[in-house]
Image (cartoon, coloured by chain):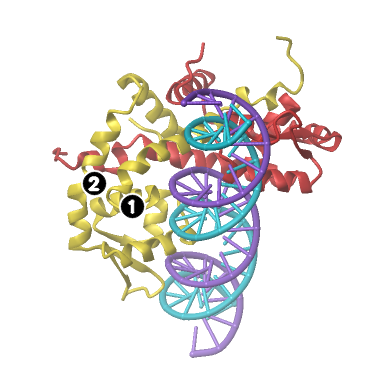
Chain colours: A yellow, B red, C purple, D cyan
Amino acid sequence: MKDNRYDSLKLENQICFPLYACAKETVRRYTPFLDAIDLTYTQYIAMMVLWEKKSLTVKQMGEYLYLDSGTLTPLLKKLEAKGYITRTRCEQDERSLIVEITDSGEKLKEQAVEVPAKMAQCSSLEPEEAAALYRILYKMLGKTVE
Amino acid sequence: MKDNRYDSLKLENQICFPLYACAKETVRRYTPFLDAIDLTYTQYIAMMVLWEKKSLTVKQMGEYLYLDSGTLTPLLKKLEAKGYITRTRCEQDERSLIVEITDSGEKLKEQAVEVPAKMAQCSSLEPEEAAALYRILYKMLGKTVE
DNA sequence: TATAATTTAATTGCGCGCAATCAAAAAACA
DNA sequence: TGTTTTTTGATTGCGCGCAATTAAATTATA
């Protein structure tokens, strides 16, 4: 196949495209398992942060998740409506909103723990491939791993 | 750090999360360059298919891009409104809609070719890392490469 | 202290992304 | 042939994802 000066515009020569497609496919594969506990993928990773940190501000959540308030505010209101979290202004700094997990949110962890186990069975990657992928992705995110 | 049975729910132990975050960050990095030619990222990859194939059905585009008609129909109408494509029913099979690139759409390629060049400068990956990433992502997509 | 700059969420608006549903056309089949 | 099934896009509705704007609170500074 002879090269031409537009080869850089071919879909097959992009690194961004399989990344974009793969991310979507992965979220799609999570969906049936997450439907069972009535969470979307984004709500699921938001709960992950809360299961680990218990309490943090919207800003901190945004930094962990690479999401801004335009995404988080309505999402957190939904999680609050489901009873998994509380949203309270910080007394020391009224600009900050503190998100805290509730007992109900903690209990959800019991059901959620099944999700990674079920997803693991779907993976087509060898452990070394998954490790390489993990390292490279975090490098792209500007966070060196190891 | 001692393990516990919830470790599988930690954000740092997910492979899906850096994939999801990285895809978003990558699209975000494209945005300023794509703004210059008035395309969104999804419109950009749709045009990539058309620059290469010239003419194909919505279904075929969906297969290439991993997108369904709910996403493509409005997106293609926008590209049609911009004059880059035409949308015509197939005469042999009226169910199919044929998407074709216009001269104007072809011309856009001249400006678009700058985008990959500019993006290349932003990459923090070594060539071997990019190659590994490419191979692993396509493996996840169920398409073996090489 | 008064004012300016910064920080933090919330809001708004737009573009996906996709599941579910629908309708039209074509293909399969009894 | 007529009926059923499948294929293909379009539509609808909801949840992000994010840029841009706003408003409130805090901090920095003259």
Q: Which residue lies furthest to the right in this view?
A: B103
Identity of the residue drawn at 31% across and 53% down: A38
Q: What residue type is labelled 2?
A: Ala
Give percent across and percent down for residue A6.
75, 23
Query: Going 52% across and 36% down the picture, which residue do you hit?
Result: A20
With respect to residue B146, does B27 lie above or below?
A: below
Q: Which of marks 1 and 2 is nearer the N terminus?
A: 1
Q: Is mark 2 on a helix, strand or loop?
A: helix
Tags 1 and 2 in contact by the CB under 8 Å rule?
yes
- Of the numbered discs in the image, which one, if any, rests on residue A112? 2
Name which residue lies at 60% across and 27% down: A14
- Evaluate whether residue B118 shows in this view: no
* Disc 2: host chain: A
Reply above or below: A145 against B145.
below
Front-lying residue, B118 or B48: B48
Q: Do labels 1 and 2 share a chain?
A: yes
For mark 1, what is the residue? A39
Please report the residue visible at 78 percent of the width from the left and 48 percent of the height from the top.
B81
Cα–Cα gap, marks 1 and 2: 10 Å
The image shows residue D11 at horizontal and vertical percentages of: 61, 54
